[in-house]
């Protein structure tokens, strides 16, 4: 992946997830962001954390435990330049029940900070009023939900539209990571290091 090194140097990226997050949709984008020079924090609501970690889902069964850097109640969007939302079926479904998680996502939308969402993560964006007027993709079963929330759904590997990158599934991660890094590096938003 030559050429992306330090593309995100000085950028701080938030990853919002909880128990049941699709493992590769968190770990592979996180590694790509870090390889591009970003400082990345995994943020999770207290309800999903056990022993400082969240348990990921690995396609068909429980996967690894992923360390949490910041508990959601202590996370502030102003400390971040961009947001990555990994999917999995359980993860966004749990997040939708956490008003603080929806509000955290909503602040990125209000502040026009770039967001990347893969697979079922679009559910979280729907609840945060972040899809109306966007062209997006997602896991196919979400297309009606997205259309009902005012988005135009398309079946493509990756879609970038007005500060939002979306992809369908784990197979799309290489294209998703490239589009996410491109969006996050070109964004005007840049958090001044504390």
Image: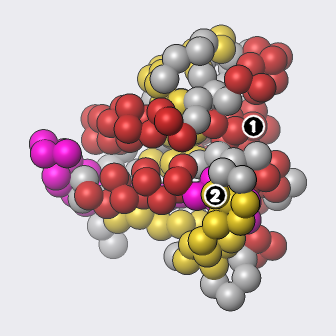
- Residue 9 located within the stretch drawn in magenta: yes
Q: Residue at x 45, y 39 (%)?
A: 173
Q: Position of residue 9 (x, y in %)?
A: 22, 57
Could one spot residue 127 in this view of the protein? yes
Q: Which residues are magenta?
A: 1-23
Q: Position of residue 169 (x, y in %)?
A: 58, 35
State the residue in front, 101 or 141. Answer: 141
- Residue 64 located within the stretch drawn in magenta: no
**Which marked residue is nearer to the observer: mark 2 or mark 1?**
2
Q: Quadrant of the C terminus?
A: bottom left
Q: Where 93 sits versus 133, above or below?
A: below
Q: Where 153 sits versus 33, above or below?
A: above
Judged from the image, the secondary structure of the residue bearing numbered disc 1 is helix
Judged from the image, the secondary structure of the residue bearing numbered disc 2 is strand
Check the image and name the residue furthest to the front: 60
Quarter of the view holding residue 168: top right
76 to the left or right of 11: right
Q: Residue at x 63, y 84 (%)?
A: 52
Q: Quadrant of the N terminus?
A: top left
Numbered label attached to residue 123: 1
90 to the left or right of 188: right
6 to the left or right of 46: left
State the residue in front, 38 or 140. Answer: 140
Q: Position of residue 170 (x, y in %)?
A: 54, 40
- Please report whichever mark, 2 or 1, sits nearer to the chain's N-terminal start: 2
Check the image and name the residue furthest to the bottom: 51
Q: Residue at x 26, y 58 (%)?
A: 35
Residue beneath label 2, please? 58
Check the image and name the residue furthest to the left: 3
Q: CA distance from mark 2 to mark 1?
A: 20 Å
Q: Magenta stretch: dominant SS? A: loop
The 10 Å Cα crowd at callout 2, few under 14, some 14 to 19, many 20 or more, is some
């Amino acid at each position: 992946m030559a050429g992306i090194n330090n593309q995100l140097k000085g950028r701080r990226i938030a990853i919002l997830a909880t128990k049941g997050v699709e493992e590769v949709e968190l770990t592979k984008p996180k590694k790509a962001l870090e390889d591009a020079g970003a400082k990345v924090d995994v943020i999770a609501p207290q309800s999903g954390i056990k022993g400082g970690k969240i348990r990921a889902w690995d396609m068909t069964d429980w996967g690894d435990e992923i360390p949490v850097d910041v508990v959601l109640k202590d996370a502030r969007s102003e400390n971040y330049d961009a947001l990555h939302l990994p999917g999995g079926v359980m993860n966004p479904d749990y997040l939708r029940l956490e008003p603080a998680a929806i509000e955290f996502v909503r602040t990125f939308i209000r502040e026009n900070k770039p967001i990347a969402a893969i697979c079922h993560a679009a559910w979280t964006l729907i609840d945060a009023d972040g899809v109306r007027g966007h062209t997006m993709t997602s896991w196919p079963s979400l297309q009606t939900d997205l259309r009902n929330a005012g988005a135009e759904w398309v079946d493509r590997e990756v879609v970038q539209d007005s500060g939002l990158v979306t992809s369908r599934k784990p197979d799309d991660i290489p294209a998703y990571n490239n589009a996410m890094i491109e969006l996050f590096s070109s964004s005007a938003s840049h958090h001044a290091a504390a």
